[in-house]
């Protein structure tokens, strides 16, 4: 085998080094891409969400509250109001179309129109309505609130237009007004409960809202 010259040896060494450098560069590029994909997946898999679903990092809307509590005071008196909602339990109600109505509309629930449904069958119902003034419970009959479906119970007021659920007490602590907004669109309504210390409670329903 002919003896290799210095020049040929030098070219061969340079070629080998160049090849190795290229291989190393490819390896680095592959590793960097894998790391970037892993990081992106971690960002998308924020608490409460699987990779690719966004989770909290994607600004997913907060679910409407299942319960709302309003507390306050007036004239040295204090009050607390708590309303809670749940999925409509059809098996616990009598749901029937209106006799002679067009396509059965509006549907009746327990023999009464279902407020907040625009004639349909509810999907949400109130199941809790608790009121206390100065630590004493004021019972509110179910007939005054059980037919108020699709309730909105958010007590916050982020846009300055008023909370969905609010309440205020008279200075003498004998009259408490509770306001709740329900449903949306054609089924939207405002319920006002006028509660009194002597138990002579009344209710107003205003609908539809514009």
Image (cartoon, helix red, strand yellow):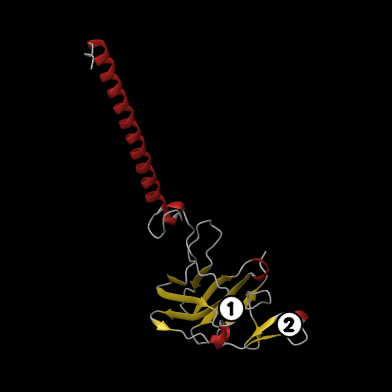
Q: Tell which circle, 1 or 2, labels the residue nearer the N-terminal end.
A: 2
Q: Which residue is mark 1?
A: 148
**Is residue 29 something that shows in the picture?**
yes
Query: What number of labels is visible?
Result: 2
- Dot 2 lies on which element? helix
Examine the rendered structure and indicate whether residue 123 appears above or below residue 56: below
Q: Which secondary structure lies at badge 1?
A: loop
Residue 178 x %, y % = 53, 74
Q: Which mark is residue 8?
A: none
43 left or right of 2? right
Query: Residue 18, percent across and down?
Result: 31, 23
Residue 104, numbered circle: 2
Near-viewer residue (134 or 11): 11
Q: Residues within 10 Å of mark 1 (few under 14, many from 20)?
A: many
194 or 26: which is nearer to us? 26
In the image, residue 6 above or below residue 193? above
Work out which quarter of the rendered image holds the C terminus and state it. Answer: bottom right
Q: Taking 5 as reference, is 31 left or right?
A: right
């Amino acid at each position: 085998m002919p003896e290799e010259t210095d020049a040929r040896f030098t070219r061969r060494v340079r070629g080998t080094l160049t090849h190795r450098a290229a291989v190393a560069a490819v390896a680095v590029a592959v590793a960097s891409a894998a790391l970037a994909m892993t990081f992106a997946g971690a960002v998308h898999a924020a608490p409460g969400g699987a990779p690719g679903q966004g989770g909290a990092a994607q600004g997913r809307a907060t679910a409407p509250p299942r319960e709302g509590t309003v507390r306050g005071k007036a004239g040295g008196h204090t009050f607390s109001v708590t309303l809670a909602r749940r999925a409509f339990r059809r098996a616990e109600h009598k749901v029937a179309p209106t006799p002679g109505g067009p396509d059965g509309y509006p549907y009746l629930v327990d023999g009464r129109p279902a407020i907040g449904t625009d004639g349909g069958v509810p999907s949400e119902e109130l199941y809790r309505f608790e009121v206390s003034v100065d630590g004493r419970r004021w019972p509110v009959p179910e007939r005054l609130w059980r037919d108020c479906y699709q309730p909105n119970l958010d007590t916050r007021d982020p846009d300055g237009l008023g909370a969905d659920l609010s309440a205020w007490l008279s200075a003498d602590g004998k009259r408490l007004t509770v306001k709740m907004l329900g449903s949306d669109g054609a089924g939207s309504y405002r319920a006002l409960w006028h509660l009194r210390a002597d138990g002579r409670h009344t209710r107003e329903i205003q609908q539809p809202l514009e």
